[in-house]
């Protein structure tokens, strides 16, 4: 669901008006969410899934730190 939400945000007209840095961070979040989806499908190793989840969290935090509620 997260991956699809990020994809929808990327398609929004308002997103095209945002700075390149915003769009780059959004793209990174999308790639991280896709990596998490893939990890959940291919492994039951909690350490692997936790590591990929941490990447998702970091990408979201990086964007929110700069752009949330603007």
Image (cartoon, grey):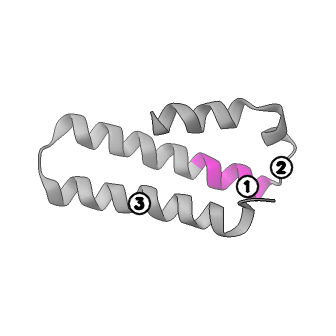
Please, is residue 56 above or below residue 5 in the view?
below
Q: Secondary structure at mark 1?
A: helix
Q: Give the CA separation, mark 3 to mark 2.
A: 23 Å
Q: Which residues are magenta?
A: 20-27
Please report contact status of discs 2 and 1: CB closer than 8 Å, yes or no. yes
Residue at point 73% right, 61% down?
67
Q: Position of residue 33 (x, y in %)?
A: 44, 44
Number of residues whose C-alpha sits closer than 10 Å to that of mark 2, classed few (under 14), some (14–19) or many (20 or more): few
Residue at point 54% right, 50% down?
29
Residue 25: quarter of image: bottom right
Disc assigned to residue 55: 3
Number of residues whose C-alpha sits closer than 10 Å to that of mark 1, classed few (under 14), some (14–19) or many (20 or more): some
Q: Main secondary structure of the magenta part?
A: helix
Disc on the earlier residue, 3 or 2: 2
Number of residues whose C-alpha sits closer than 10 Å to that of mark 3, classed few (under 14), some (14–19) or many (20 or more): some
Residue 10: quarter of image: top right
Residue at the disc numbered 2: 18
Residue at the disc numbered 1: 22
Residue 49 horizontal side relative to residue 3, left or right: left
Residue at point 76% right, 32% down?
12
Q: Give the number of callouts.
A: 3
Q: Secondary structure at mark 2?
A: loop
Q: Position of residue 48 (x, y in %)?
A: 20, 56
């Amino acid at each position: 669901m997260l991956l699809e939400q990020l994809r929808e945000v990327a398609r929004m007209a308002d997103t095209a008006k945002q700075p390149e840095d915003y769009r780059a961070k959004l793209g990174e979040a999308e790639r991280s969410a896709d990596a998490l989806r893939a990890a959940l499908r291919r492994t039951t190793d909690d350490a692997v899934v936790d590591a990929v989840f941490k990447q998702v969290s970091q990408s979201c935090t990086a964007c929110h730190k700069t752009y949330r509620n603007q």
